[in-house]
Image: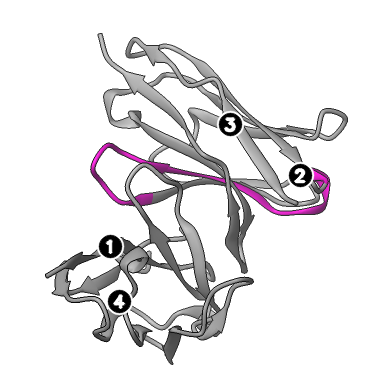
């Protein structure tokens, strides 16, 4: 099983600032099948990034993904008020399809 | 527009059974990989099961032998039969499109299963 470890657990930032979230895998992610999801309170998660760096339909270009192998990053270039949420990474290349524990981006 | 609507969640005693449904619209469930993902209260996300287009299905170790995923193409609906329920199965259950080498690109709103005496 591939264990995904996200860091930090929580980050406190102000609107307009840049957010950098990390996701580290315990072994190489098959074909970089790594996704990022955003979840707001009381809502279902929403796909942001797939294939480590491809934005999903309708996702603004302020969100970008990078990385390969075992180290991946989600960057939000300029935080908008609606971007404060919990973010999860997930690998979908090897069963079981595991998620990271999440990073909460909160308003400073 | 793809839409997924889950139902069937309830308060159920340990050892009981429950069947969750996921009514799909905007696409055919027979044409996509379909999965169930759950989230325990205040916790993170966890993959539960996936069914392939050809009907093959796979499960996480925590539910293998107790849960069964299926679909009714005529009703365009995905199901999750849950038997021998345990307290640790308490969670919001989400129906999602995708799985295997595809990300979860559409999510339902979830249905809550609470296992408690």
Q: Say if B95 sits above or below A73 in the image.
A: above
In the rendering, at what x and y percent does residue B5 appear?
62, 34
In the rendering, at what x and y percent does residue B83 appear?
48, 20
Nearest-to-viewer mark from 1 and 4: 1
In front here: A95 or A11? A11
Give the residue number, with chain letter if any, for mark 3: B6
Residue B100 is drawn in which quadrant? bottom right
Discs 4 and 3 lie in a common subunit:
no
Residue A85 is drawn in which quadrant? bottom left
Mark 3, chain letter? B
Taking the image as shown, residue B114 lies to the left or right of residue B83, namely: left
| Residue A85 makes an appearance in the image | yes
Nearest-to-viewer mark from 2 and 1: 1
Tags 4 and 2 in contact by the CB under 8 Å rule?
Answer: no
- The span picked out in magenta is B28-45
Which mark is on residue A13? none
Q: Residue at x 31, y 77 (%)?
A: A79
Q: Residue at x 31, y 67 (%)?
A: A81
* Local secondary structure at mark 3: strand
Sequence order check, earlier mark of 1 and 4: 4
Tags 2 and 1 in contact by the CB under 8 Å rule?
Answer: no
Give the residue number, with chain letter if any, for mark 2: B55
- Which residue is outermost to the right? B74
Which mark is on residue A102? 1
Q: Residue at x 33, y 84 (%)?
A: A78
């Amino acid at each position: 099983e591939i264990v995904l470890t996200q860091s930090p657990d929580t980050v406190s930032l102000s609107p307009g600032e840049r957010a950098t979230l990390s996701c580290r895998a315990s072994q190489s992610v098959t074909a970089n099948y790594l996704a990022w999801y955003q979840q707001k309170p009381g809502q279902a998660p929403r796909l942001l990034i797939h294939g480590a760096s491809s934005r999903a339909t309708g996702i603004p270009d302020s969100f970008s993904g990078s990385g390969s192998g075992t180290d991946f990053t989600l960057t939000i270039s300029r935080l908008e008020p609606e971007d404060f949420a919990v973010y999860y990474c997930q690998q979908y290349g090897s069963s079981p399809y595991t998620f990271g524990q999440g990073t909460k981006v909160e308003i400073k | 527009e793809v839409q997924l609507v889950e139902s069937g969640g309830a308060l159920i005693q340990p050892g009981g059974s429950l069947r969750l449904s996921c009514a799909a619209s905007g696409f055919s469930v027979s044409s996509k990989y379909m999965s169930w993902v759950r989230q325990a209260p205040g916790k993170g996300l966890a993959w539960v099961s996936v069914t392939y287009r050809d009907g093959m299905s796979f499960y996480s170790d925590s539910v293998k032998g107790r849960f069964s995923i299926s679909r009714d193409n005529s009703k365009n609906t995905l199901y999750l039969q849950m038997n021998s329920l345990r307290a640790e199965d308490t969670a919001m259950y989400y129906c999602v499109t995708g799985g295997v080498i595809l990300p979860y690109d559409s999510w339902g709103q979830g249905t809550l299963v609470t296992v408690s005496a």
